Amino acid sequence: MKSQIKSLRIWLIVDSKDIGGIESHILQLAKGLTLHHQHVSVVFLCRYHKTHPLTHLLNHAKIDYHFLSGSIRSLLQLTLQHRPSVIHSHGYKAAIYCRLIRLILFCTQCNIRFINTFHAGEIPTGKVKLYDAIDRWSACLNHTNFAVSDDIKQRIPFKTNIINNFINTDHLPLSHGKQIAFVGRLSHEKKHRNDL
């Protein structure tokens, strides 16, 4: 008997100007969810001056995306208009905005699950240190929290599950060369050296 998976409307929320680890993660996650017949949209909190390079990859993968004005109000309006099943935030600003949306909608009939993935491994300084603290200490407002490594998980004061970074290797040719291709940046917080 074939199992029936309910199709959900899933938003992946990000505030981003370029492609890095978070954006690569979002693209792979969106592709994987689409393969499992979920309706996925990537929502950028703001459209910056240049065309976001992720949009070309999303177009190629036939994944919907939207740009907002950068305000919490624009995210709230889109949420009330489309009522997604799941809002999954990535990055400090997106996470904080989504938690504020959850607080605003708390007494409404909106039945939305809020999920967040913690990606940042570095210990921030300056203004980002404040965002990081708000992000970590408001994580209790999510239904589910993920972190991409154990070191990152240890910094979150609430229940957080590990989700490994992933990339679909199904269509990558096997190579026997002596060079290594690497996507992202080497950062000890992302994985322990003996795990590489």
Image (spheres, rainbow, N blue to C red):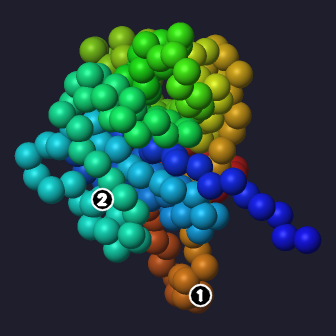
Where is residue 146? Give x, y as percent.
62, 35
- In what element is the residue under mark 2? helix
Residue 174's disc is 1
Q: Nearer the viewer, residue 189 or 57?
A: 57
Residue topped by disc 2: 54
Tags 1 and 2 touching, CB below 8 Å: no
Mark 2 or mark 1, which is nearer the start of the sequence?
A: 2
Q: Position of residue 12 (x, y in %)?
A: 45, 44
Amino acid tagged 2: Leu
Task: Please give left or right for residue 127 compared with residue 106 in the image.
Answer: left
131 to 57, vertically: above or below = above
Most extreme residue toward the right is: 1
Residue 90: % across, % down: 45, 37
Q: What kind of residue is marked 1?
A: Leu
Residue at left 37%, top 17%?
131
- Measure the alpha-carbon separation of dots 1 and 2: 26 Å
| Placement of 163 over or under 31, stated as above or below | above
Q: Residue at x 34, y 25 (%)?
A: 76
Q: Residue at x 27, y 67 (%)?
A: 56
Give the foreground label among 1 and 2: 2
Residue 64, quarter of the rendered image: bottom left
Query: Is residue 152 at all visible to an observer of this figure?
Result: no
Up-down relation of residue 24 to residue 104 (above or below):
below
Badge 1 element: loop
Number of other residues with Cα within 10 Å of mark 2, as a class: few under 14, some 14 to 19, many 20 or more = many
